[in-house]
Image (spheres, rainbow, N blue to C red):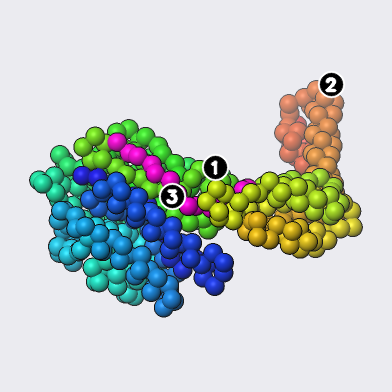
Amino acid sequence: MKLGFFSDTHFGFAEGTEREGECFENAVEALKICFDNHVDAILVSGDVFDEALPSPETLSRSFDVFLHAFRAPKSRVKILVQTKHGEKEFSFSGIPIVAIHGNHDCRSIGKTNILEVFSKSGMLAYLYPGKAVIEKDGEKVFVHGFSAVPEKKARDVLSLWNPVAVSECTNVLLLHQTFKEYLPFQDDAMASMSLEDLPKGFDLIVNGHLHWVDEHNLGDTLFLLNGSTVTTQMKKLEAEKQKGVFVFDTVSKKLGFFPLPNQRKLFYFDLKFEDAKPQEVIENARQALKSCAIGDNGLVPLARLKLSGSLSLGTSSLDVDLSEVLSEVKGRAIVSVSKNFFSNSFKKKITDLRLAQKSKQSIASMGLEILEKNLAETDFADAFDAQEVFDLLSEDKLEEAAAAVLAKKT
């Protein structure tokens, strides 16, 4: 069998802006790649929608997207969906889509999820949690679906669910979580799971949520970030790797990547400054954005402009007015700007505090060293704890210090 993978289509993203059609157009391209590679089923690992309660306009355009798969030549596979409520054969037309929900299209327990609605319409098979058995010509693929849960509970919930790979079959696990290995710092509220927490025995573990592409070999298991089909976060890693579709051959175990043919290019500029004047920042931003060029596909590129550091004394980020620069690149780039400056006066206060703290520690250390040296030259020597007495003296507790010395000497 051949399986197609993509994720994070974010239907409804940028609604009401010049980019509102991009999520739908990219999803259609992803489906066409799957059709061209003759996949038997398509697996989507979360965030099909950008919001849990999409607008009627978004719902209408989403149905149009799914109709491409619904009207495609019918796949010869059979799909049995297994959940805690029992087993049910998924009835579909065309190429089947199996999906889990992400954090964007998740709703609280007891509330109808939008993916349930599409599942009832026959547009997709929704796993929450559960597994789908895809069968064709005697071959079976088990797709275990672990829809998004709060990050701080993810590890415990996955352990409780405990998905087990079925022997002598291809096993795929779909996830939509953050992993500690992909964070710049450790924070259990943002990620409680590590890659080592993932279950063993699976051929392929595919994770959504993170919008860039990456692969890791975990023993005999391939861990895959299949990224998003639309750029929403404008992160640096998204600028380095293209967005696209993965196709997995269950017999050869080969994984192929096929980029979307008409995706917007993303330029990422991380500009740092030291004691800079506002005009200097503005000019550097202008020069950086000049490198943005419309792609061969005719699409206006995206640009992420990250400005940080310190500004000259008496100025603030409000003085860095980029309106003229943004006006100059209008029509040539869609720009997102973040400014994270701190003033010189604040920086000086922090430096002074650090020096004061360091100086205080140095003086205290020096005082203790002198006390210990002087004691070594008397018959007191090691008669009492010099650190204890020194601390009492530094706190002006003279009587307690004297008592400690005399008590130990006696």
256 part of magenta stretch: yes
Residue type at mark 2 is Glu
Q: Residue at x 20, y 63 (%)?
A: 93
Q: Residue furthest bottom?
A: 56
Quarter of the picture holding the N terminus: top left
Distance (Cα) linking label 2 and label 3: 81 Å
Looking at the figure, which quarter contains the C terminus?
Answer: top right
- Residue farthest to the right, as pictured: 314
- Is there CB contact under 8 Å for labels 2 and 3? no
Residue at image x 35%, y 39%?
256
Q: Secondary structure at mark 1?
A: helix
Residue identified by numbered label 2: 377
- Residue 323 falls in image quadrant: bottom right
Give the extent of the magenta segment. 254-268
Question: Which quadrant of the view contains residue 119?
Answer: bottom left
Q: Residues within 10 Å of mark 2 (few under 14, many from 20)?
A: few
Q: Residues within 10 Å of mark 1 (few under 14, many from 20)?
A: some
Q: In this picture, is 20 found above or below 210?
A: below
Residue 240's tag is 1
> How far apart in space, not on screen, are marks 1 and 2 (Cα)?
67 Å
